[in-house]
Image: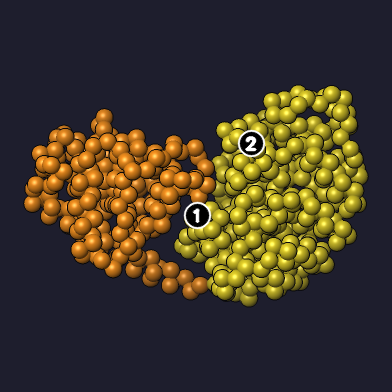
Chain colours: A orange, B yellow
Amino acid sequence: MNIVLLAGSIVGSKTRTALEYAERSAINNYSDHQIQLIDLAEHDLQFSDGRNYLDYEGDTGYVTKAVMDADIVIIGTPIFQASIPGTLKNLLDLLPQDGFRDKTVSMLATAGSSKHFMIPEQHLKPILGYMKAQIVQTYVYIEERNFANKEIIDDDVRFRINRLVEDTVTHAKAYKQFQKEKEASYGF
Amino acid sequence: MEQYRIDQRKGLEFGLYTLGDHLPEPHTGERISAQQRLNEIIEAAKLAEQAGLDIFTVGESHQEFFTTQAHSVVLSAIAQATEKIKIASSSTIISTLDPVRVYEDFATIDLISDGRAEIIAGRASRLGNFELLGYDLHDYEALYEEKFDLLRQINDNEIINWEGQFRKPLRNAEVLPRPKSGALPIWRAVGGPPASAEKAGRAGVPMFLATLGGPVSSFKHSIDVYRQAAFDNGHNPDALPVATAGFFYTAETTQQAQREVYPNINEGMMRTNGRGFPKSHFAQGAHPRDVMNVGSPNEIIEKILYQHEEFGHQRYIGQMDFGGVTFDQLKRNIDIIGREILPAVRKHTQK
């Protein structure tokens, strides 16, 4: 399967740090899969103007196509103004409205404090659901104090990220199997 | 209905449409040449005429995997190759063309074909035409509304005075040649949410409704909205024809039809839209109350009659060549339409 880890912000380092750890976890355990980390900070994305994602050129076209080609998307997001960053929302806007159909999507959030714990649940999940994602229900929420010098310093967080990656891949495999059986039943 | 050349006593009109897509055959991965594709489209129109179909239409898309960008030229060739079948665009993207030039082309096709040409004007679901033909996507809606209105004015007036935003004014302009009967049937292509159908109704123009898949009831809603909007704005809905367009494919059994054409539609859409057609939706399309006319001849007859009962429409056109369907398959389909489907549909919808 094709796994994309998506860092949804162009500001700060915590989300990227956590996703890099998730990437290593994926490489260690699922080396037979295609694994790619995309950091929006490294790409210059234009605002969505409503066209088909295939019609975007350059970085915008590259990132949208990479996400659309993925079977699994692990989204990493900081919390800005009590919500997801505009850069992440813009990427979601760039995709088709059912852009996550048949994809398994999970979430990892970083934040300055524990006060925003429900933001992924209330702001990101409804969007993923609307876009027809198979959502991994539990997410990893990481606070400022769990990082130092662009490293995760808390074993508990490492354990939770490892489990998120494992849950995500297991969920995707189960979904693929379910889809295969359903499609076989049509007889065409 | 006469001004739109529709005689309801003859029953529901039945036709075929092509978007002129140029895609690989999914089983072999091979793609015929653009030249062969164009010739096969013209050949299919001839076969459709021989099988007794009422209309054959060709659309334009200006991007990779399409080949009838110059759709009016293709229609002109079909006009010459056929004698009685109606011919139209499906659709002409009026937003990025000059309505004067479009009218000249289609009036000419009308004369060559002895009064068989119609225009179905849309605003594009694939947007390659905007950049290629030099228009700004930001003007998507304004371009369509202005140019569609100009097209209708040219149709209604031999001498025209007009001023707008997107082209130089016309002063006592005479757009020639005129069509055989003085005017062309001009339809508004409608897809998506009912708001678009409502606009067509408000303007009092015939509506061509795209119905790729989904319950008949949801498309009936768009048609109801269209007729109500027409009535509310002083037009007589009974004088305005409605046509539907959607996927068509027939084989001995429904499952065989699905098996034969699903890969074409799925992979074709993957290439042209970046998303396939979910197999579960396609499977659901076989339901008697779904608009998708893919199935055995008998099931298709039942579906079309049910749709006719619900929609009260005057014309149906099917798309059955999408995604590299081979010419042999097309021939077989046209043959079954002519022998089995058309006689039954006509028998039950004639007045």
Local secondary structure at mark 1 = loop
Q: Is residue B87 visible?
A: no
Name the residue tied to disc 1: B274
- Is mark 2 in CB contact (under 8 Å) with mark 1? no
Residue at image point 65% right, 56% down: B66
Q: Is residue B147 left or right of residue A103?
A: right
Local secondary structure at mark 2 = loop
Please provide percent x and percent y for residue A56: 49, 45
Q: In the rendered image of this protein, does residue A127 appear above or below residue B263?
A: above
> In the depicted view, which residue is nearer to us: B63 or B176?
B63
Please provide percent x and percent y for residue A59: 42, 45
Amino acid type, label 2: Tyr
Residue at image point 76% right, 57% down: B56
Q: Kindly report the distance in space between the C-alpha atoms of the residues bearing marks 2 and 1.
A: 23 Å
The quadrant the N terminus of chain A occupies is: bottom left
Of badges 2 and 1, the one in the foreground is: 2
Residue B295 is drawn in which quadrant?
bottom right
Residue at image point 63% right, 73% down: B251
Residue at image point 86% right, 31% down: B157
